[in-house]
Amino acid sequence: MPRPIHARIHVSALRNNLAVVRAHAPSARVWSVIKANAYGHGIRNVYEGLRGTDGFALLDLDEALLLRSLGWQGPVLLLEGFFSTRDLDLVSRHHLATVVHNEEQLRLLEAHRGRRAIEVLLKINTGMNRLGFAPSQLQDAWTRLSALPFVSGITLMSHFANADENDGVAHQLSTFEKARAGIPGPASLANSAAILWHPATHHDWVRPGIILYGASPTGRQADIAASGLQAAMSLCSELIAVQVVARGDTVGYGSTYTASRKTRIGIVACGYADGYPRHARGSGRERTPVLVNGQRCRLAGRVSMDMLAVELPAHCDAGPGSPVTLWGPGLPIDEVAASAGTIGYELMCALAPRIPVQAD
């Protein structure tokens, strides 16, 4: 029999979250970001919930081809562009849009002999300092792309480093606007945080990522509590055993948890090999929350490879087979992540391949 741990992807939540994006940026088209296998949710699992988007944005050609195999005929954007002539041939053959962010990519395009139209997003480095042409290089890059007969359109884009802060876009937005002065065409700037909190950045295309999956760009659940976003993933399991420990007894590796009284300890079929964070707090006052039978409990001791322990409150009569929610509706992934010193993005992407995943 399989272990009881499983993940569920909530299609209705994905549809809801896409609608929230459109409500915040009603005049913009939407690139739904599904990189990293849809933030760990699975492209196949999220496709039905997000197929109302205007386009999908991702990194890998294999993921782009998977989308095409699912029947998606609309725009698909490669966020890091292409890396070789062979990649460029596939971009052309499968009618993909591509980011162009450096001189080498520009030269490969200039040497390309394909006849099919290619849509380009020309990336400007406005201060993130990862990818993109310097503002001073933009005019030359745009002119060279415009001269290529197979380039069917050019959208200018950039990416914000601090859009989750109150004044976090001002400098980069100003740099972008100055750089593109006199250059026609659409623009794409807004990531999840900018969509929610900086409407001046919305322009023609927005690029939501984490908010499509119901988590906060800041890592703080309180920041999206009133947004209407819904959790798109639940990680669930069951209790597989219950231990009764006396006051002073310890639990788990390193004996980091000590019972302050006679306590029932529930053992859950979930560990760090399943993608649950090993460093989730299991001792002290601010221990990581877990739902058992819908009741909020706390971790007890260190997370093991395949199991974790929770302190069952006196009023909780849970036993083997009782349902457990590690994160999902009722227990935000951001709260679990914060207790482990990380962010919801990482927990989503860390879901182990051995976890059965189903879309509902």
Image (cartoon, helix red, strand yellow):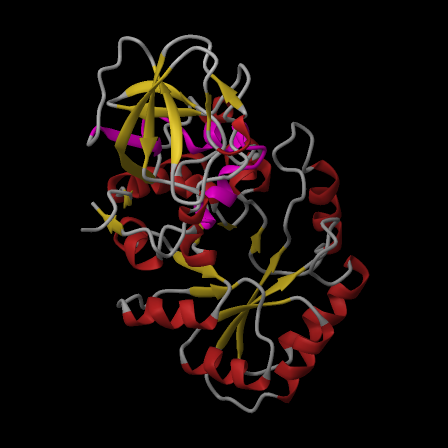
Is 39 on the left or on the right of 68, as rendered?
right
Which of 30 and 229 lies nearest the eye of the viewer?
A: 229
Q: Is residue 263 visible?
A: yes
User: Up-down: is 290 above or below 71?
Assistant: above
The x and y percentages for residue 90 are: 46, 81
Q: Is residue 125 magenta?
A: no
Per the rendered image, the range of residues in magenta is 322-350
Which of 8 and 179 lies nearest the eye of the viewer?
A: 8
Which residue is depicted at the point 58% across and 54% down? 187
User: Up-down: is 253 above or below 89?
Assistant: above
Q: Is residue 336 magenta?
A: yes
Which residue is depicted at the point 41% across and 8% down? 261
Q: In which quadrant of the rendered view does residue 149 lie?
A: bottom right
The x and y percentages for residue 202 are: 54, 43
Which residue is depicted at the point 70% across and 77% down? 104
Is 332 on the left or on the right of 188, as rendered?
left
The x and y percentages for residue 80 are: 58, 65
